Amino acid sequence: MNDYLRSSDVQFQTSYDSRNTSLGASRGTARFYVARPNLLRVELSGTGFSYVIVSDGTIFTIYDEKKRKYAQLPAPEKPIQAVNLFTGLAVFEAQVLRFLGAVSDVANGDPSVRTDVGGSERVQDTQCNRYSIGYASDRDADKWDVWLDNSGVPLPCKTVLMSQNNGSVQTNLYDWTNGRSPPDAFTFNPPAGSTKVSIGDLDMRPPY
């Protein structure tokens, strides 16, 4: 899986259900396009919100489709840094890229990562192998239950993140796409009638 993610453009859609003991619940879908070293596009939507975030390697853009406003900043070096800039709403979907980071740590033999093997289970229409991933040290208290496709490239069918720090649980289901990203995936062209604003004027708030 790690070799696939390192050598390929990554495209997938995920539906998520996030529950936080203090903040409430959020549900939605997100489509990810990721290409190394720092190209990213995320189309994120749910009840009452719809955002597009794009990093073309130079400029990082957040576009609020509901309000038709966008803000731009210098692009970060890595896609996960771009998502983390998207405070408020994308904090939920940032967990997806954090999970992919944990996979990289496992592949690189990080001794602080513990992996336990479970059984085989069916997720939607795919037979998957279940694993548990967690860090032995205090630097990351999050734990993942992961279901990986066992019919070919072991890509995630489902992940469940359990955060020890804030009591949140996030479940993601995945639909992966082979092939290169569309040529314009990492380009932002302001839609007609949209307005450029400062990052603070987007007034982003979590959807709960």
Image (tube, grey):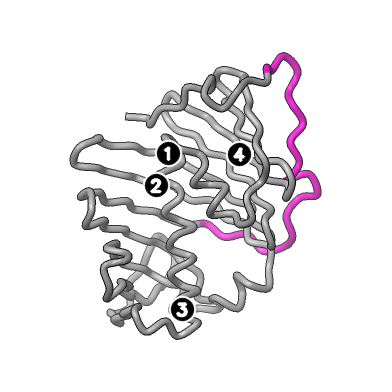
**Three-letter amino acid code of the residue under disc 3:** Asn
Q: Which residue is mark 2?
A: 16
Q: Is residue 144 visible?
A: no
Q: Is residue 5 above or below residue 107?
A: above
Residues at marks 1 and 4, CA–CA distance in whole angstroms: 15 Å
Callouts 1 and 2 close, C-beta under 8 Å: yes
Q: Position of residue 109 (x, y in %)?
A: 45, 85
Question: Mark 4: few, some, or many residues within 10 Å (few <14, many ≥20)?
Answer: many
Q: Which residue was labeled with disc 4?
A: 53
Q: Is residue 33 in sight in this rendering? A: yes
Where is the C terminus found, in terms of image quarters?
top left
Q: For marks 3 and 2, give the one nearer the viewer.
A: 2
What residue is shown with label 3? 150
Of residues 47 and 208, the one nearer the viewer is: 208
Q: Are marks 1 and 4 in contact (CB under 8 Å)?
A: no
Please provide percent x and percent y for residue 95: 41, 54
Residue 180 inside the magenta-drawn segment = yes
- The reply to whether the magenta stretch includes residue 208 is no
